[in-house]
Image (tube, rainbow, N blue to C red):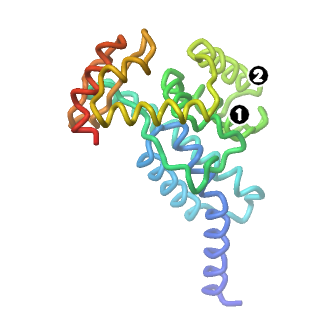
Amino acid sequence: MSGETRARDDLHDAIAAFDGQRRRLFGIAYRMLGSVADAEDVVQDTWIRWQNTDRSDIREPGAFLATIATRLSITVLQSARVRRETYIGPWLPEPVNTEDDPALGAERAEALQFAVLLMLEKLTPTERAAYVLREAFDYPYPRIAEVISVSVVGARHLVSRARAHLSSERRIAVEPSAQRTLLEAFLVAAQEGDAAQLEKLLADDVVSYTDGNGVALAARIPLSGRGRVAKFIAAFSHHFW
């Protein structure tokens, strides 16, 4: 076999191995970063590193690729925190369409919920990485420790601390069917600009966060209270729809 043929076959194998892990890599990066664009960049950077790596001694491509994606995501998240400190208005995670792949490569789909992504913003980068790997992908603690370069005890501590942070923020769980019913009623009222109906749907202590991507019309500070939030949504309904 010629050197050119071997190189071509090796690249073909590299592409096949990477494609088999692509959704998982995106799932890890997206849950950590809360941004589709940033997650796609991490996946692309992971591919570049994979392509330029001597793969002859790598026995578990999936584990190797997940480690790269996680560490790249930690780096991006650290710099993103600095950018978000100067962001105009509240920064919110970017929802992703999950119709084609509801779990986005994860064993546990709950970690994809928007509310969980929002709460994850309060964790440190390493806490977030440990939590995502454990809760979304069911990684064993020794593997988590290897990925984020801590001891097994340290990995357990990070996950435990992350769970404690999130449980203190978590509200009463609601069945998906009830969520859907509320969402549909909210959309109708919001589209029609019906402030009175909106008030009926909202809790007394509701807080509204709006993210205009730093440029679009949005409330630059969170709005609290059922009346204020309902009036705001009704007043700007023609912009949203």
| Quarter of the picture holding the C terminus | top left
Which of these two is toward me, 112 or 234? 234
Question: x%, y% of residue 209?
Answer: 35, 24
Point out which mark residue 153 bears.
2
Q: Position of residue 174 (x, y in %)?
A: 62, 25
- Residue 176 vs 47, above or below: the answer is above
Q: Earlier in the sequence, mark 2 or mark 1?
A: 1
Q: CA distance from mark 2 to mark 1?
A: 14 Å
> 93 and 146: which one is in front?
93
Q: Secondary structure at mark 2?
A: helix
- Report the residue at 29% width, 14% height from top: 228
| Residue 49 coordinates in the image, percent (x, y) | 54, 57
Q: Mark 1 sits on what residue? A: 134
Residue 93 sits in which quadrant? top left
Compared with 94, 61 (above or below) is: below
Query: Residue 29 is drawn in which quadrant?
Result: top right
The amino acid at mark 2 is: Val
Q: Is residue 83 left or right of residue 107?
A: left
In the shown orientation, is residue 227 left or right of residue 215?
Answer: right
Which of label 2 and label 1 is nearer to you?
1
User: Which of the 4 quarters of the picture holds residue 54?
Assistant: bottom right
**Within 10 angstroms of label 1, few (less than 14), some, or many (20 or more) residues?**
many
Residue for point 65% across, 57% down: 21
